[in-house]
Amino acid sequence: MNRVLKIKMIGIALLLLSIISSCKKFLDVVPSELVTDEQVWGNINNANGVLANLYYLLPGVLVPGGGSLEEITAATDESYHHWGAGYYPLYYNNGAWNPGFNPYDNWASQYQNIRKANLFLENIDKVPIPGDQAIFYATVIPRYKAEARFIRAMFYFELFKRYGGVPILTQSYKPTDAEALKMPRSSTDDLVNFIVSECEDVAAQLPLTYPDANLGRITKGAALALASRTLTYAASPLFNGNTKYAAIKNQDGTVLFNQTYDREKWKKAADEAKKILDLNAYTLLKVAGDPINSYARVFNTREWNEIILAKTVANTKGLEQELNPYGGVFGGWGKYSVLQELVDSYEMKNGYPIDRQGSGYTTEGFWSGELYGGGGYSANVTLSNISNRFKDRDPRFYASIAYQGSKWAIDHTNNMPIWLAYWGGNGGTSQGWPKSTGTYPETGYNVRKWCDPYVDLLQYWTSPDAQRNDPIFRIAETYLNYAEALNEYHDGPTAEAFEAINTVRARVGMPGLPILPEDNTKEGFRKRVQNENRIEFAFEGHRFWDVRRWLIGETVDNGVVHGLNAKPSTQELNATGLDVNSKEAGLAVFYKVVPLQTRVFNYQHYLMPIPQTELEVNTKLVQNFGW
């Protein structure tokens, strides 16, 4: 197997395209009369299509097709969705979601998906196999079943992180089985044990690697990675001894959330992560001499050493079009305004948080010079008049965020700096002017992560499409899970915990911990791990769930969020004494942190409500806290 892990699920994707249309309706909760059991399970190619469909349904951070980033990033303290009213993240920002309206609810869809997996497991052994293929399928069908069990476990994890314990169904039911489907929720611990036991069992049956033609299929490492993530969540404060949830009980009195903190859960999480590390199968991508692209190319190429499992997405310019700065030579739509809170979380390159004495951070003055890899390529880019607040930061900052004066893909953007400050009379050449379309970033920052510098949106039909994958599990997560679990279990960081987090930091040339005295304490190291997760997985769909499992949402997602002053008032511009439509006036008032939005996060928001429609159908279900 190619250790660089050029994740291609070509075979699965082609099979999906050829068969999904014929089996999709059958796989709904209520089978269509247009497709029969015999048509699906009477032909091995159709049965293969069912498995391909299950792969397609695996959750990712990119929407199917790969041309758009899931908007959940704007429901966190990473970004703001500035395209206007009606977009789902705004409801979470405002606390305006409930059991009857929860855009990120997936109860019904996940149980439909679970039913599909159960149908596959119940029927695949009955599918007639042509004689000349008997030997081949005798080997692969057991593996297919292991893959389907993993995917089913993943569907249950998606329910677990939203709701806690849910009913566990390991067989399919017909629409006429309505009474049998009226079952109570399992306890959260029982659901965790089910997911982990499934993963452990199938890990023993799955290969560690595949030939190139089958890369992207579920491996032993993927099964262990799901178990590791599940156990890490289960050990976290949301699910481990949360006494706020004491009253959430089934009708028979079964408590659904354990009420006693169990430190041993962290030991289980650490042990599971160590199993993955001991496979020695995954290596963090490094580009020699280029820490910025060592990180950036994880997301804009398929040269991924570190992928444990990914969804394949089509070659497309969609993400570049969505995320690149608005208009002009950049040609993008600038979908998200990155929040100052995220920008401030990136450390200085000496490893100090920006608010610590000795960091060297300053908001005063400007800097000009060369930044290797800062333009998207492995090459120097010359920058001018850059605020010192953007100087000498963690390389992941430059790989993830577009800021005032930064450059991108200079080969086809005429070496033009990105202008994110206000410039009212710019004639369309700025990315920060007040356009009626709402496509300009309102915070003075744009998302750079995921974008391929070789995509030229102004040459849309002749420029190459980006080739990327949608990572479900990366080895960086395993290292950070391991570091977190060891710190919590041992009441402070161990040598192994430092080694794990420093492996992730070293990929981009960040200095190893400890740096500050408090890095040697349980609480101080916990802050480091949480921040490392925040920046390593920015815009990858982790933050929404991490703030919940850590019980920090009331702090980080509640209250005012900020940006730079990219939308100054006319009064502010007039006060400069400059032409209010000039770039000089906009820049004169730009470098000021200003409030953008006041957000609402209450304790009830840590878990999602069981949908009201489900409570009405299944009277044995009980609701989550606060709903």
Image: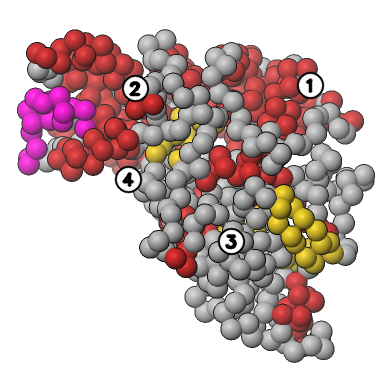
Residue 292, position as x, y percentages in the image? 67, 45
**Residue located 80% across and 43% down the image:** 349
Choose the circle earlier in sequence order: 2 or 3.
2
Q: Which residue, given by chain and number where applicable, does mark 3 sit on?
A: 411
Q: Is residue 47 magenta-colored? A: yes
- Tag 4: amino acid: Thr
Between 436 and 90, the one nearer to me in the picture: 436
**Residue located 62% across and 50% down the image:** 377
- Front tag of 2 and 3: 3
**Residue located 15% across and 16% down the image:** 133
Main SS, magenta residues: helix
Q: Which residue, given by chain and number where applicable, does mark 4 sit on?
A: 613
- Label 1 sits on a secondary structure element that is loop
| Mark 2: few/some/many CA within 10 Å (<14, 14-19, 20+) | many
Q: Which residue, given by chain and number where applicable, does mark 2 sit on?
A: 147
Between 200 and 68, the one nearer to me in the picture: 68
Left or right of 452? Residue 528 is right
Q: Are marks 2 and 3 in contact (CB under 8 Å)?
A: no
Left or right of 23? Residue 405 is right
Range of residues picked out in magenta: 33-49
- Front tag of 2 and 4: 2
Report the Cα–Cα distance between label 4 and label 3.
Answer: 54 Å
Q: Which residue, given by chain and number where applicable, does mark 1 sit on?
A: 492
Residue 559, position as x, y percentages in the image? 68, 56
- Tag 2: amino acid: Glu
Q: Quadrant of residue 146?
A: top left
